[in-house]
Amino acid sequence: MGQKIHPVGFRLGITQEHKSRWFADFERYPKLLQEDHIIRNFLEKNPMRLKSLESPGISQIRIERKADQIDLEVHTARPGVVVGRGGQGIEELRTGLQKALGDSNRQIRINVVEVARVDADAGLIAEYVAQQLERRVSFRRVVRQAIQRAQRAGVEGIKIQVSGRLNGAEIARTEYTREGKVPLHTLRADIDYAYRTAQTIYGILGIKVWIFKGEIIPGQEETPQPANTQPRRRQQRRRQQYEDRSNEG
């Protein structure tokens, strides 16, 4: 069997960045790492989803630390659901995180960032597939719709894999669908990867999404290409050669 590796961890320092950006010595590191785990679990399983009919659609969470202050960068498809009226949602998130961390005086700064291309984000697509599977929609139909939405967004390739008791079958299996190219072995390839679970009445289904957004070549954007200079020269040379041949004949 093939040896699988996480697409994001494989490209750390090349085309991907760490989702937690802070430094600590060996004594504080376990405590801060546990805090990151508590923060991510709280935001992903936030009770405000039960109050609102629509989910906030959180794509990713980035954590930075400055002294005793925690800076959170929440990327979401619906910033209005997270922020709330007059910033009330952010205040509820801050107080909830302080209770989860066990420190009511902890300084937490929350910055909400809107995802520009919703249909080209692996986390949001995986969440959409999970929500549809929980509503007992056929997995083939859901995967086909998600791939069509991603192709309209302009991605170069997408692969969606669903595992578990598909459509309530007795035996669990794994099926995947791929459109375009998804070069997982290429380090400069910009691969967006996400994993979600769907809680169905017949078991848990796992959803994995890979999205190929193109290659990131260092220095390519710094050297702009001249605008349509070579094709014009070629056309002029061809016309001159043709005129010369006709005069000789």
Image: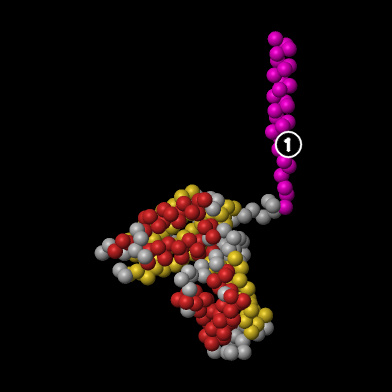
The single residue placed furthest to the top in the displayed view is 249
Q: Is residue 141 above or below residue 106?
A: above
Mark 1, secondary structure of its residue: loop
Q: Position of residue 126 (x, y in %)?
A: 46, 63
Question: Quadrant of the image for the C terminus?
Answer: top right
Say which residue appears at 64% left-offset and 53% top-offset: 217
Question: In the image, 67: left or right of 184?
Answer: right
Along the horizontal axis of the image, is 184 left or right of 197? right
The magenta stretch spans residue 237:
yes
Give the residues in magenta.
Answer: 222-249
Q: Main secondary structure of the magenta part?
A: helix
Q: Quadrant of residue 80?
A: bottom right
Q: Taking 95 as reference, is 127 above or below it?
A: above
Provide the residue designation for mark 1. 229
Q: Indicate whether 115 appears above or below 221.
A: below
Q: Nearer the viewer, residue 249 or 56?
A: 56
Along the line of sight, the residue nearer the viewer: 223 or 199 = 199
Residue at 55% over, 51% down: 154
Placement of the N terminus among the 4 image quadrants: bottom left
Residue 92 in picture, x, y percent from top left:
56, 81
Magenta residue check for 235:
yes
Which residue is at 73% across, 12% downward? 247
